[in-house]
Amino acid sequence: MTDGEVLDLFRESGALLEGHFKLSSGLHSDRYLQSALVLQHPAYAERLGSAIAGRTRHLQATAVLSPALGGIVIGQEVGRALRVRALFAERQDGALMLRRGFTLDPDDRVLIVEDVITTGGSTRETIAVAEAAGAQVVGAASIVDRGSPRAELDVPLQSLVKLEVAAYDPASCPLCARGVLVVKPGSRA
């Protein structure tokens, strides 16, 4: 898929929002990518998952691990396309961890899959979950990398789209300075 094709899916789904948003990272932005609106359409989710799988197949992952909540659907689709298990890590007492009987083994080659990466914080947390279980993390992937600068990870990152979207510290946010009401649309609202 091209950048344009991916962004067209976001536009068609009403998933490219404009306004004043508080991101999961705590940063503020004037644009927000509400991936759930795209991923609610199974055909779109399948296309995006297949595209990520096509770009990461060479890593020979044996499992996909995604952070809940935003990464679950796309992680499942990437796992389906790669024909490997798709697990998710979820928060308990503020920390990501494997629950629900999910396990990873030292033989597992894990691909971390997210919907949107901004700072890379939840990706790094998910990498740590896999490594704590003894698995080898072979890479990370996302539908959109909106980080500026690019998220610093210790594994290769493959994103379908690199989108330059400004993100501001709340203390220096021009939207806050103008008194524009901030909205928290993500999964950690």
Image (cartoon, rainbow, N blue to C red):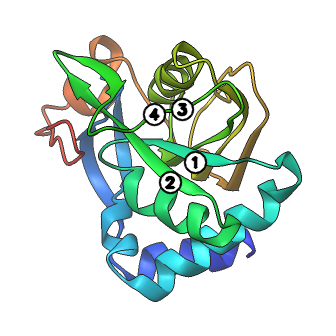
Q: Residue 86 — which label?
A: 2
User: Which residue is at the front of the view, 188 or 7?
Assistant: 188
Which is nearer the N-term, disc 4 or disc 2? Answer: 2
- Quote the CA–CA distance across marks 4 and 1: 12 Å
Q: Which residue is mark 4?
A: 103
Mark 4–mark 3 CB contact (< 8 Å): yes
Eye-nearest disc, 2 or 3: 3
Q: Amino acid at mark 4?
A: Thr
Q: Which residue is mark 3?
A: 104
Q: What residue is at 40 percent from the left and 25 percent from the top?
A: 168
Q: Amino acid at mark 2?
A: Ala
- Quote the CA–CA distance across marks 4 and 3: 4 Å
| Quarter-of-image position of residue 102 | top left
Q: Mark 2 falls on what kind of element? A: strand
21 with respect to 64 (left or right): left
Which is nearer the N-term, disc 3 or disc 1? Answer: 1
Q: Mark 1 falls on what kind of element? A: strand
Mark 1–mark 2 CB contact (< 8 Å): yes
Q: Mark 4 falls on what kind of element? A: loop
Q: What residue is at 50 percent from the left and 35 percent from the top?
A: 118
User: Which residue is at the front of the view, 37 or 65?
Assistant: 65
Q: What residue is at 55 percent from the left and 25 percent from the top?
A: 130
Label 3 crowd bin: few (<14), some (14–19), many (20+), radius 10 Å? many
Which is nearer the N-term, disc 2 or disc 3? Answer: 2
